[in-house]
Amino acid sequence: MQITVLAGGVGGSRFVRGVREECARRWPDGDGGTEASVSVVVNTGDDIWLAGVRLMPDFDSLLYSLAGVNDTERGWGRAGESERVAAELREWGVGWPWFTLGDLDLGTHLARTAWLREGATPSEVAHRLQQRWPLGVHLLPATDTEVDTDVLVADPDQLDGEREMHFQEWWTRYRATLPAVAFRQRNIASARPAPGVVEAILGADVVLIAPSNPVVSIGTILAVPGIREALAETSAPVVGVSPIIGGKVVRGMADACLPVIGVETSAEAVGRHYGSRSAGGLLDGWLVDEADAPALASLEGIGLTAASVPLWMRDLDTSADLAGAALDLAV
Ligand code: GDP
Ligand code: CA
């Protein structure tokens, strides 16, 4: 059984932990793990150079969370983190004072940057970082091309009424409150899927789209030329899980992103936005929450196999049940 998941950071991490757990239940290897092989195509659109180091926030969220070294209370970064280096960087005026880099986290960024400087590609670095902890899944950056996302925001103080900033500044400094006009992924037209990504999609028995941000997580993965084509071509069923429950984003600020691409904040609208594979879209199946069951008929009407189950990932059990429901929809 080969399962390939497309995922962003926070929603992606919870979901992939559920997939790993559900696989261990369905296809146990007798050693607490699974005989199934799980590959995760990870969003790289939030990546950024900051204070001289390369950050890959979604990749690191998945890495820390799957390794069990994440801070579960804060919801991001490493457990037991300290911020001594960040305080020094602030004194030097290096980096962004509103974007704290924890000491342990900086260790990861320094290792990554060191390897990049030695000539390793981001996906080679990703491979090395995963050697430290037995994750039980393979994390693959979607692309080795730097496709950092810029946000174009309306700004009446500017001559042309607009201003561009890195996604991290818009998201973290301004909490996505500045009116976004567009998202632009740098170099996207010339980007290529990282080694193994197309193979993971074409060779899969099931492809799952995590309940991640449809615009800046899944949207960026899909924007890498070649990935959409692989999803269209694969013989595996493609099943998505809605990140929207009852018209609300469950965690985070994805509702600030959907209007920018003209999509309403609803499970039905995101399902329609991804579209049915039978009509040139992305999905065969679409899972919505029980609160969104009234949308099922209309979703079936556009050629999707749709079902409603509890979509809140409260803990490992609920995440595993959700992963199981997604796998069931794939058969
Ligand atoms: P990010 O990269 O950290 O922004 O995380 P992702 O892109 O992976 O996921 C963010 C989205 O996950 C949020 O906007 C939510 O809509 C969604 N999400 C978070 N927790 C849950 C959950 O428990 N259930 C569902 N269905 N979606 C969730
Ligand atoms: Ca992200």
Image (cartoon, rainbow, N blue to C red):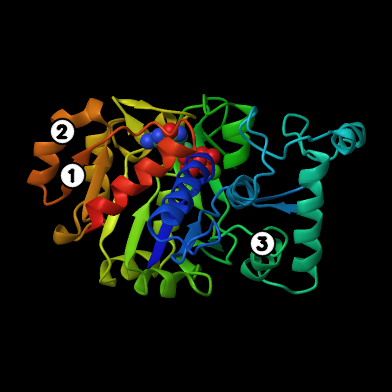
Disc marking residue 295: 2
Q: Is residue 248 left or right of residue 88?
A: left
> What amino acid is labelled 3 in the image?
Gln
The yes-or-no answer for disc 1 within 8 Å of ligand 1 is no
State the image coordinates of residue 166 (x, y, percent, origin top left). 60, 43
Disc marking residue 130: 3
**Residue at the disc numbered 1:** 306
Which quadrant is home to the C terminus? Answer: bottom left
Upstream in the sequence, badge 1 or badge 3?
3
Q: Is residue 177 left or right of residue 276?
A: right
Question: Could you tell me which residue is drawn at 35 percent across and 55 percent down?
Answer: 208
As measured in the structure, the alpha-carbon distance from the residue carrying label 1 to the one carrying label 2 is 9 Å
> What amino acid is labelled 2 in the image?
Ala
> Between tags 2 and 3, which lies in front?
3
Which quadrant is home to the N terminus? Answer: bottom left
> What amino acid is labelled 1 in the image?
Ala
Q: Residues within 10 Å of mark 2 (few under 14, many from 20)?
A: many
Upstream in the sequence, badge 2 or badge 3?
3
